[in-house]
Image (spheres, rainbow, N blue to C red):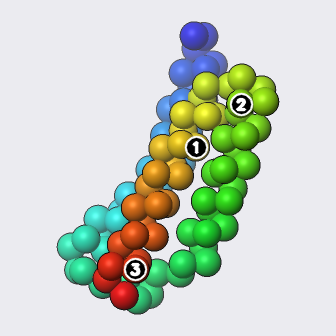
Amino acid sequence: MEGIDILGIVAGICTSSSILPQIIKTLKKKKAEEVSIFMFIVLMTGNALWIYYGFVKSDIAIISTNFFALALNIVMIVLKFRYC
């Protein structure tokens, strides 16, 4: 793994982690009415397409960070249905 690959993984983790504050807020307040389900569906679609692209290109940074983001988006959708 080269330095540029590590940079790609770190960048992907930073971007993917951007949903964590919303997850934490939803867990603390146990409220998710204001959360847009459509936004997370669009994000999950984008993640799935990036994962496919990553497999086509054999790019572990794209694959791993988008699987991470997809998992976080799934968590947020579950919380949306649980606390709505």
Identified by mark 3, the residue type is Phe
Dot 1 corresponds to which residue? 66
Tag nearer the camera, 3 or 1 = 3
Give amino acid for label 1.
Answer: Asn
Visible residue check, residue 22: no
**Residue 39: where, in percent of width, then height?**
60, 73
Q: Which residue is mark 2?
A: 55
Residue 32, numbered circle: none
* Neighbours of disc 1 within 10 Å: few (<14), some (14-19), many (20+): many
Find disc 3 in the rendering and name its residue.
81
Q: Are marks 3 and 2 in contact (CB under 8 Å)?
A: no
Could you tell me if residue 70 is visible in this image?
A: yes
Alpha-carbon neighbours of circle 3 within 10 Å: few (<14), some, or many (≥20)?
few
Task: Label 2: state its secondary structure.
Answer: helix
Camera-nearest label, 1 or 2: 2
Q: Residue at x 60, y 10 (%)?
A: 2
Q: CA distance from mark 3 to mark 1?
A: 23 Å
- In terms of sequence position, does the residue under pointer 1 or pointer 2 come before the other? 2
**Upstream in sequence: badge 3 or badge 2:** 2
Give the residue drawn at x 54%, y 78%: 37
The residue sitting at 35% across, 65% down in the picture is: 23
Q: Earlier in the sequence, mark 3 or mark 1?
A: 1
Question: In screen coordinates, is 30 left or right of 66?
Answer: left
Q: 20 left or right of 40?
A: left
C-alpha gap between disc 3 and disc 2: 31 Å
Which quadrant, please, contains the N terminus?
top right
Where is residue 15 drawn, in percent x and y? Answer: 54, 48
Splitting the image into 4 quarters, where does residue 11 fall?
Answer: top right
